[in-house]
Image (cartoon, rainbow, N blue to C red):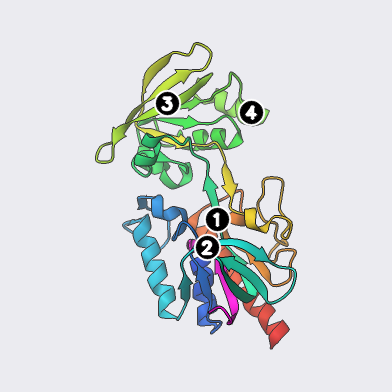
Amino acid sequence: MADEIHKVVILGSGPAGLTAALYTARANLEPLVVEGLEPGGQLTITTEVENYPGFEKGIQGPEMMDVFRRQVERFGTRFLQGDVTEVKLGKRPFELVCDGKTVRAEALIASTGASAKWLGIDSEQRLKGYGVSACATCDGAFFKNKEVVVVGGGDTAIEEATFLTRFANKVSIVHRRDELRASKIMQDRARRNAKIAFVWDSIIEEIYGEQKTGVSGVRLKNLKTDKSSDFKCEGVFMAIGHEPNTRIFKGQLEMDALGYLKVKPGSTYTNVEGVFAAGDVADRVYRQAVTAAGTGCMAAIDAERWLEAHHG
């Protein structure tokens, strides 16, 4: 594999990367997927997925990614375990360094995703997918007639909280400051919503609950009084931002102010010829499995046409 020049290398094995692999494999481009540190992407830490078309009864996130993987393997997709630590995009074939080994590619699809920012406490890790989530659109429907907490103070937190009021009886926004960072129009919308309450100057120290029974509450610490108190809730949604996994592309691919890869409108083309971006790595708005898969398809078709035009 060291001396081989691959027609297409795909970085990332979530819905975007595996959909790109499916299309490029069926086009006889023999794609190589570099799985990354989190094979299967964010869906591997999700429990029930009910909003992906084709699974009428829902499916567990890890199981869904296994289905994706088996499907692309059927068409000859190859996989390389590990993480790319360096990319050289100044000339073709592109060179990627993966666990010390060099991988060469005529075309590259970047689908390295974005990672939700978490609080970093043990109970949060233990209860991810069992009442702790970073995606209201994905998981809100599981909290009908329940009381939930949203952590954050920006536009994302207000959007998540507002969305959750469609299902939950009460949504409490926990924010470490005494005023929101969200835009005024978003703040006004939240304050007008009778289901939304605010817990100011506070952080979550611990999340109570068990995987079998879900979240039962949180321990809050008031940063002004330094006092801790218990707060009853049945779900916790983190809305403190996402970070695109684009560090290896800095200085080579164009990014927006938040670090998401820029693509030419209506396509997956980046500013470097032969490099395409798909999924959450280039999507700061939707961040859904189905939209990631859609752009994975687009990137594969763009790469196939580009290769045909440049290599015949």
Q: Which mark is residue 148?
A: none
Q: Position of residue 120 (x, y in %)?
A: 46, 36
Label 3 residue SS: strand
Up the image or down, 186 lies above or below 139; here it is above
> Which residue ends up furthest to the left in the rendered image?
212
The amino acid type of the residue labelled 2 equals: Gly
In this view of the protein, can residue 127 be seen by the observer?
A: no
> Is label 3 or label 1 in front?
3
Q: Which mark is residue 181?
A: 4
**Is 10 colored magenta in this rendering?**
yes
Q: CA distance from mark 3 to mark 1?
A: 28 Å
**Is 242 colored magenta in this rendering?**
no
At 48% from the left edge and 13% from the top edge, which residue is drawn?
Answer: 226
Using a 10 Å C-alpha cutoff, classify the residue at mark 3 as few (fewer than 14 neighbours), some (14 to 19) or many (20 or more).
Answer: some
Q: CA distance from mark 3 to mark 4?
A: 22 Å
Up the image or down, 153 lies above or below 99; here it is above
Residue bounds of the magenta highlight: 1-15
Image quadrant for the C terminus?
bottom right
Q: In the image, 258: left or right of 70?
A: right
Residue located beneath label 2 in the image: 12
Q: Earlier in the sequence, mark 3 or mark 1?
A: 1
Q: CA distance from mark 4 to mark 1?
A: 25 Å
Q: Position of residue 119 (x, y in %)?
A: 48, 35
The amino acid type of the residue labelled 3 equals: Glu
